[in-house]
Image (cartoon, rainbow, N blue to C red):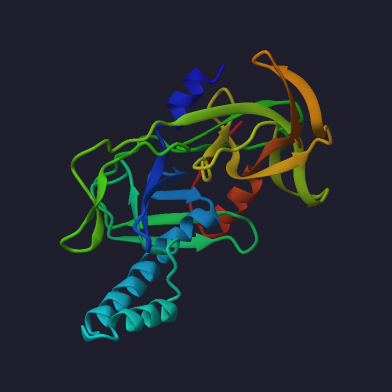
Amino acid sequence: MFQEAIEKVLQFTRPLHSISRTYGGLLLPGSSTFFFVNGNGVAITCKHVAEMIPAAESINQHFAKFKSELRALPNDNKYKRNVQGLELKYKYLPETSIQLKNNFLNCFDQIREITCHAHPTLDLAILEFKGFNKIFYSSHARFIKDSSRIKQGMSLCRIGYPFPEFSNFRHNPDTDDIEWTNTGNPNSPSFPIDGIVTRFVASNPADVTGIEMSTPGLRGQSGGPLFDSHGIVYGMQFATNHLHLGFDLKDHEIISNGKRTKVSNNPFLHVGICVHADKIKEFLKEKNISFTETD
């Protein structure tokens, strides 16, 4: 049903790969999604995804200051205690992120600057890429023009990059830095998930801000498009809500592997929430950014 639509949408949907390092030494890959709305290097994603761009600079600068002070400590019998004091000053625990780097894949030959416009209330942001000479994405999103066509029970699909399989990164012990490499797997597969429209999200009936789907939006699909079987964009995935079903079981006896056992379960229905296309278009108009609508 969505085969051709997925091919169309992947022409303008891209992954954001991130690597982070904890103070305890763990190196963690992560991924999220963004998609382009015109041929001028402008994309949209979630606000919580866009916030990783300035956050990376802040986190990395904080660690650089820590290392500078660490190097200045005298190597005497007070060194260990002074290191602990420095860790306390910088609020570093084993699980604290001390480095973060982002990589926007298959978009441009180079990126000099990224301007972020964050929506004041919605989990929505515009990314304006600057300083490129060549564009590596083809096509761009076509938004639904008449949103009254979006009905309860309609089948729609989301796509993104929820399972980071890329491995082209490492910690360089010589520089004590995390870095991208030319070895390993540089890619992660796209992953679609369909569902039906269940409800609409609105502060009042006249102001619909979101579309609820019967299936979850997966971690890493944040910022990915919601689209129909023609590849027309109806919204953008940004969150998943967890609805308690009330079918709770406590010490319920079952037979498993030939043995009687007792299980407990509190089931939830996980539903994806998408920013409505109308709100995306309103924000693009507010920032004087061109986009395409279609019937």
Residue at 73% x, 35% y is: 269
When the figure is inspected, residue 246 is found, relative to residue 262, above or below; the finding is below
Q: Can you give x and y, in whole percent of width and height, for residue 138 in the image?
A: 36, 35
Which image quadrant for residue 111? bottom left
In this image, 12 relative to 232: left or right?
left
In this image, 194 relative to 99: left or right?
right
In this view, which residue lies farthest toward the top? Answer: 258
When the figure is inspected, residue 278 is found, relative to residue 7, above or below; the finding is below
Which image quadrant for residue 267? top right
Q: Can you give x and y, in whole percent of width and height, for residue 99 in the image?
A: 35, 62
In this view, which residue lies farthest toward the left? Answer: 174
Residue at 23% x, 84% y is: 72
Q: Can you give x and y, in whole percent of width and height, for residue 41 in the image?
A: 37, 49
Q: Can you give x and y, in whole percent of width and height, for residue 82 in the image?
A: 33, 84
In this image, 76 relative to 36: left or right?
left
Residue at 68% x, 37% y is: 270
When the figure is inspected, residue 86 is found, relative to residue 286, above or below; the finding is below
Q: Quadrant of the N terminus?
A: top right
